Image: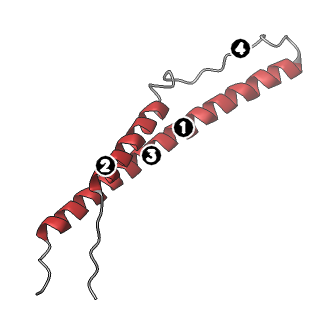
Amino acid sequence: MAVDLTVETALIRQAADVLDDASTVLAPDQLGGAARCPLVEGSLGDSALGREVVGAANRRVLQAAEAANRLAGLIGETARKLRSTATTFEAAESSSIGRPR
């Protein structure tokens, strides 16, 4: 039994565009290049605890920026795969043989 499958490639491409926008927002140039923590040495006082908090905050900011960069890459790759999928569906549809009579 043959069943027709309708694939809305325009919606797949639209989803890819949304993912591209998300990837752009997370890209390093949108995050200000090198991530900077607003806390600098001495901003929480000269105590050992203050220095440790500033150091930990700086490390976390760098980790978050690296994670955002990796996420942007994964999102961009997903967008490319969605476009490839839409293209494949369009090619399959244009080359499909008509139904048997």
- Three-letter amino acid code at the position of disc 3: Ile
- Three-letter amino acid code at the position of disc 4: Val
Q: Would you name the residue on which mark 2 appears?
A: 13
Dot 4 falls on a residue whose secondary structure is loop
Alpha-carbon span between mark 3 and mark 4: 32 Å
Quadrant in which the C terminus appears: bottom left
Q: Residue at x 76, y 21 (%)?
A: 54
Q: Are marks 1 and 4 in contact (CB under 8 Å)?
A: no
How crowded pointer 2 is (Cα within 10 Å; few <14, some 14-19, many 20+) is rated as some
Query: Sequence-wise, which precedes: disc 2 or disc 3?
Result: 2
Alpha-carbon span between mark 4 and mark 2: 44 Å
Quadrant in which the N terminus appears: bottom left
How crowded pointer 1 is (Cα within 10 Å; few <14, some 14-19, many 20+) is rated as some
Dot 2 falls on a residue whose secondary structure is helix
Query: Sequence-wise, which precedes: disc 1 or disc 3?
Result: 1
* Callout in the foreground (2, 1): 2
Give the number of the disc on residue 60.
Answer: none
Query: Sequence-wise, which precedes: disc 1 or disc 4?
Result: 4
Dot 3 falls on a residue whose secondary structure is helix
User: Residue 28: x and y, percent?
Assistant: 47, 29
Q: Would you name the residue on which mark 4 appears?
A: 40
Give the number of the disc on residue 68.
Answer: 1
Q: Is residue 46 above or below residue 69?
A: above
Query: Sequence-wise, which precedes: disc 4 or disc 2?
Result: 2
Alpha-carbon span between mark 2 and mark 3: 14 Å
* Callout in the foreground (4, 2): 2
Q: Residue at x 28, y 56 (%)?
A: 9
Q: Residue at x 12, y 69 (%)?
A: 95
- Three-letter amino acid code at the position of disc 2: Arg
User: Residue 85: x and y, percent?
Assistant: 30, 59
User: Residue 31: x and y, percent?
Assistant: 51, 25
Alpha-carbon span between mark 2 and mark 1: 23 Å
